[in-house]
Image: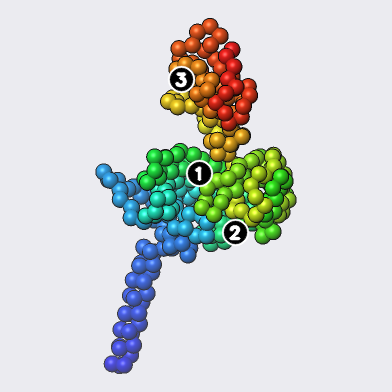
């Protein structure tokens, strides 16, 4: 009898341990290898200040942001709708340091699939992983800070450029034919400075065609592909824009041949304001036929302004 009682006591203890483990497991339910936890009901986080230690994790050339909110769908292997926000720092401690606040919206794959695709972004399916990002970029070691945005297709790699030709070839790419048309491509030097920017007019799996010809030396360059965002919309326009300096139109470097400006100032721009053909200048002190000037000759020079 004592042996039977001991066995029954052991069974009772085991049952209790199992129930405790079930309770513990329910309180620490994980949805996947990303370590996420599901909490039943509505959870509110309130406070005067929320402090998060940790920045976005770089995996390949892609930054995974620290704060992510999903729409709740959990279908296996399916894209999930997500918004995200967080800090990304590049060149930390150097003269090229940039502190980026990234606001992200789009649909993406599971963490594992997204990491695989974005480590080789030129092999991504942009219908399956589609995103838009708004970035506040601050350079503490310089006088430059920018607010910019882009959407899918967003990609990059290394490609061969031939001077005077209009294609760039990336033998490692696997783009969907025609999927990049309308996006823009930039090539950079070894220091990361942008050399040229053009719109994409066609693409195959490995070759991208631009709306111009390359002027850089025939070499293999790092390239980036991006698609610009709209500011406002037809139904929801901004009421007014405030600009102290000028309005820049076109793409590429500020002094490049593809860029024109709408500028303003006091007095005639002739011999004083450098710009490309097609730029406009407004004179605050102008009179009849000397208030508006159009740059009609002399790309990259301060001459060629004609009063209208």
Eyeballing the image, is 125 above or below 14? above
Disc 3: which residue: 265
Dividing the image into 4 quarters, which one contains the C terminus? top right
Q: Are marks 2 and 1 in contact (CB under 8 Å)?
A: no
Residue at x 69% of width, y 42% of height: 213
Name the mark nearer the viewer: 1 or 3. Answer: 3
User: Farthest residue in the top direction?
Assistant: 288
Q: Which mark is residue 63?
A: none
Q: Distance between the residues labelled 1 and 3?
A: 35 Å
Judged left or right of residue 73, residue 171 is right
Packing grade of label 3 (10 A; few <14, some 14-19, many >=20) is some
Q: How far apart are marks 2 and 1 (CA)?
A: 19 Å
Eyeballing the image, is 254 above or below 308? below
Dividing the image into 4 quarters, which one contains the N terminus? bottom left
Q: Where is residue 101 in the image (x, y as percent from the top left)?
A: 42, 45
Q: Is residue 117 visible?
A: no
Earlier along the polypeptide chain: callout 1 or callout 3?
1
Q: Position of residue 119 (x, y in %)?
A: 56, 59
Q: Does dot 2 land on a helix, a strand or a loop?
A: loop
Disc 1: which residue: 133
Residue at x 58% of width, y 20% of height: 305
């Amino acid at each position: 009898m004592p042996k039977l009682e001991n066995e029954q006591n052991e069974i009772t203890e085991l049952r209790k341990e199992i129930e405790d483990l079930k309770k513990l497991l329910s309180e620490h339910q994980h949805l996947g290898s990303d370590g996420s936890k599901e909490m039943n009901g509505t959870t509110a986080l309130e406070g005067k200040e929320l402090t998060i230690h940790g920045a976005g994790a770089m995996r390949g050339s892609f930054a995974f942001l620290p704060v992510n909110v999903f729409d709740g769908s959990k279908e296996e292997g399916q894209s999930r709708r997500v918004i995200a926000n967080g800090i990304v720092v590049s060149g930390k401690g150097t003269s090229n340091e940039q502190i980026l606040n990234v606001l992200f919206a789009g649909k993406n794959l599971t963490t594992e699939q997204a990491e695989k695709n974005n480590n080789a972004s030129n092999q991504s399916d942009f219908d399956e992983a589609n995103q838009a990002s708004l970035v506040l970029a601050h350079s503490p070691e310089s006088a430059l800070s920018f607010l910019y945005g882009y959407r899918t297709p967003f990609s990059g790699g290394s490609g061969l450029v031939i001077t005077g030709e209009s294609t760039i070839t990336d033998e490692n790419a696997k783009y969907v034919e025609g999927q990049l048309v309308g996006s823009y491509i930039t090539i950079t030097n070894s220091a990361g400075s942008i050399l040229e920017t053009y719109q994409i007019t066609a693409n195959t799996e490995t070759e991208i065609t631009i709306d111009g010809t390359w002027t850089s030396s025939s070499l293999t360059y790092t390239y980036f592909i991006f698609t610009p965002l709209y500011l406002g919309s037809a139904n929801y326009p901004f009421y007014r824009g405030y600009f102290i300096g000028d309005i820049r139109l076109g793409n590429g470097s500020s002094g490049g041949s593809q860029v024109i400006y709408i500028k303003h100032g006091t007095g005639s721009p002739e011999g004083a304001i450098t710009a490309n053909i097609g730029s406009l200048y407004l004179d605050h002190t102008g009179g009849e036929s000397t208030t508006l000037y159009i740059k009609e000759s002399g790309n990259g020079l301060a001459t060629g302004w004609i009063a209208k």
